[in-house]
């Protein structure tokens, strides 16, 4: 009987000298462009999101503007410090600073542990490696086998939390069709479209997640014995192929959504629309 | 740029900057060759061999991107020389061709890739389940196409070892070679882990012995694969998720307990193995370091995975007992 433990005893034979040119890379193309773009976009997003989270105002366009639009950075607004109308649920009284700080932990964790973003920031920030066939910038390397990077394995839990947030943000998008004090109280505005697109992109990002694909069917040994999970896996696989696209689109658009609502709530721009 | 390339081709010359040397050292040597339309890099290398440098060493075989012999680094990008068209390169400057960086050099563009074969020995072979009564009667295993199609993608591998070469885990850290199987062998493990007949649970082995967690999924293996196997998305990440199931996810663990999962760990598989007959297969002489199965019982010979359609007999065939009355050769 062969056991897997038996299979580990063969040492890998090392020997011989490496040859070839001793240079970090022979690439002559502009391999650095992609990491630079990644650094610029991710740094800009983190800077904007941090500012938006700490500023703690102009995140809700409410009844006084004839709208019900809340920024995704502040939803669900669960703390006692939420502005009137923004909260639809019992509040946490002991949290007195910005409610966004309580919320952003989860999407931040989801994206930080995402298999795509890991590739992006390992390449662009950690330079391990900056590009294919370009030497990485570290003397030793242990990958994700030790603390703290071993914590990347919690990705699926952030995925579960992400689904809860997607449901909440979808509910927010539905609420965005209400226009209190305007005609029948129901209408469509640019803000409605923005929140709907935002929720759609976040769903696409979550459903195309590698952990989602695995949990829905990828972990099944025999698809023929699990036809429903096979169908789910089959549906999610092409979405998974576009995970990078959805990751960037949803990231940029969630920031845009916050910015749009911030501009509307502060009175800088008008949320054009119509009501029934 | 395109116009310059056309002008350069029209000028009729291309400069090949080839690495010449061995384990003692070496340097680039430039060869100016007449440009010819429709050539790949390997064609020009052959013309250099035929004219300016008959002693230039270069490994090749099929010239069709299927044997995986002519792997090299062309302008720094790991590629097959036979699949890289000259008209995709900027020939206004010298075209650099170097040997694969991750393996010991033999001479010029040829490296010793036997390290990979040593790693291959550490991959436990298929350990098929017992046949059902129907399968015994039919003479072989039955598998549905949807159960084997995931593994079939990985069978496209031509073992060019470009993925093993580009992976920075060993490319930039030689010391990791003893603890890291590399992308080519992760797809081999994925192929077996996803195989409907395999009874081994390979997750612990992957995590603790084959260095799966050292992969930081930067996808270079996928980028260089000439067979366009989605190594990272379809093999490495699914394997990582399976390791999470086994090791880091208490919910999945509880689910397995409740559902009384049928998959066996290595130790359980050993304890529950039938008294007669091996649960795994050894090549003749056994794999080095892995004991031979006990003699007696049915001998199972695993050949290679072939296209299997629904309810078509599989590639795993049984060698009939020569003394059995059911032996068709009698």
Image: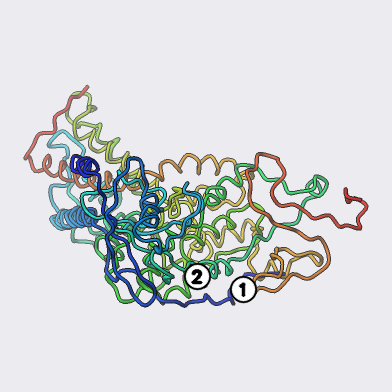
**Rendered location of residue A83, percent (x, y):** 17, 49
Left or right: residue B246 versus residue A269 is: right
Q: Nearer the viewer, residue A248 or A261?
A: A248
On the image, numbered disc 1 is attached to which residue? Answer: A5
Residue B91 vertical position relative to residue B111 in the rendered view, above or below: above
Q: Position of residue A205 (x, y in %)?
A: 35, 46
Give coordinates of residue A64: x percent, y percent: 12, 37
**Can residue A267 be seen?**
yes
Query: Of the numbered discs in the image, which one, if any, rests on residue B115?
Result: 2
Say which quarter of the image contains residue A200: top left
Chain to which mark 2 belongs? B
Quarter of the N terminus of chain B within the rendering: top left
Rendered view: B207 above or below A267: below
Q: Which mark is residue A16?
A: none
Query: Judging from the image, what secondary structure is the residue with disc 2 in?
Result: helix
Viewer-side residue, B100 vs B171: B100
């Amino acid at each position: 009987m062969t056991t897997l433990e038996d299979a580990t005893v063969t040492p890998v034979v090392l020997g011989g000298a490496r040859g070839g040119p001793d240079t970090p890379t022979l690439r002559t193309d502009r391999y650095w462009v992609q990491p630079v773009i990644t650094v610029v976009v991710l740094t800009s997003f983190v800077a904007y999101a941090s500012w938006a989270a700490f500023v703690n105002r102009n995140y809700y366009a409410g009844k006084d503007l004839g709208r019900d639009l809340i920024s995704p950075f502040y939803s669900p607004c669960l703390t006692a410090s939420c502005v009137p109308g923004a909260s639809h649920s019992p509040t946490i009284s002991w949290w007195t600073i910005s409610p966004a700080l309580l919320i952003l932990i989860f999407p931040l964790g989801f994206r930080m542990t995402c298999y795509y973003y890991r590739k992006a920031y390992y390449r662009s920030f950690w330079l391990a490696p900056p590009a294919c066939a370009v030497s990485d910038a570290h003397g030793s390397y242990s990958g994700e086998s030790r603390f703290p990077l071993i914590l990347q394995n919690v990705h699926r839990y952030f995925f579960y939390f992400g689904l809860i947030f997607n449901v909440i943000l979808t509910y927010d998008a539905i609420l965005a069709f209400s226009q209190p004090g305007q005609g029948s109280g129901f209408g469509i505005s640019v803000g409605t479209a923005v929140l709907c697109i935002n929720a759609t992109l976040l769903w696409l990002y979550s459903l195309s997640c590698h952990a989602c694909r695995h949990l829905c069917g990828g972990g099944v040994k025999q698809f023929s014995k699990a036809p429903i999970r096979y169908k789910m896996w089959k549906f999610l696989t092409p979405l998974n192929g576009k995970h990078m696209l959805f990751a960037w689109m949803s990231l940029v658009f969630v920031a845009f959504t916050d910015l749009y609502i911030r501009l509307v709530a502060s009175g800088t721009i008008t949320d054009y629309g119509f009501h029934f | 740029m395109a116009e310059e390339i056309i002008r350069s081709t029209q000028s009729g010359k291309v400069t090949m900057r080839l690495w010449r040397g061995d384990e003692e050292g070496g340097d680039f040597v430039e060869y100016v060759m007449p440009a010819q339309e429709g050539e790949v890099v390997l064609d020009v290398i052959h013309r250099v061999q035929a004219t300016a440098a008959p002693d230039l060493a270069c490994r090749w075989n099929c010239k069709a991107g299927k044997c995986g012999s002519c792997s090299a680094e062309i302008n720094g990008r790991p590629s097959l020389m036979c699949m890289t068209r000259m008209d995709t390169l900027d020939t206004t400057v010298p075209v650099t061709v170097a040997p694969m960086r991750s393996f010991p050099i033999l001479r010029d563009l040829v490296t010793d890739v036997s390290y990979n074969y040593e790693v291959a020995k550490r991959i436990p072979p298929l350990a098929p389940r017992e046949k059902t009564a129907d399968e015994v009667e039919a003479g072989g295993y039955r598998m549905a196409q949807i159960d084997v199609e995931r593994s079939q993608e990985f069978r496209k591998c031509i073992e060019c070892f470009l993925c093993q070469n580009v992976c920075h885990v060993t490319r930039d850290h030689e010391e990791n070679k003893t603890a890291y199987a590399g992308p080519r062998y992760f797809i081999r493990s994925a192929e077996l882990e996803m195989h409907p007949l395999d009874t081994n649970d390979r997750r612990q082995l992957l995590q603790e012995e084959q260095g799966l967690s050292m992969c930081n999924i930067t996808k270079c293996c996928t980028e260089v694969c000439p067979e366009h196997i989605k190594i990272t998305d379809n093999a490495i990440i699914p394997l990582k998720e399976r390791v999470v199931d086994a090791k880091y996810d208490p919910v999945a663990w509880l689910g397995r307990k409740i559902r009384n999962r049928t998959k066996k760990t290595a130790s359980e598989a050993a304890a529950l193995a039938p008294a007669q007959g091996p649960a795994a297969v050894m090549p003749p002489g056994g794999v080095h370091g892995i004991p031979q199965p006990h003699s007696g019982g049915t001998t199972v010979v695993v050949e290679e995975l072939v296209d299997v359609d629904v309810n078509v007999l599989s590639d795993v065939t049984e060698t009939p007992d020569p003394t059995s009355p059911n032996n068709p050769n009698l």
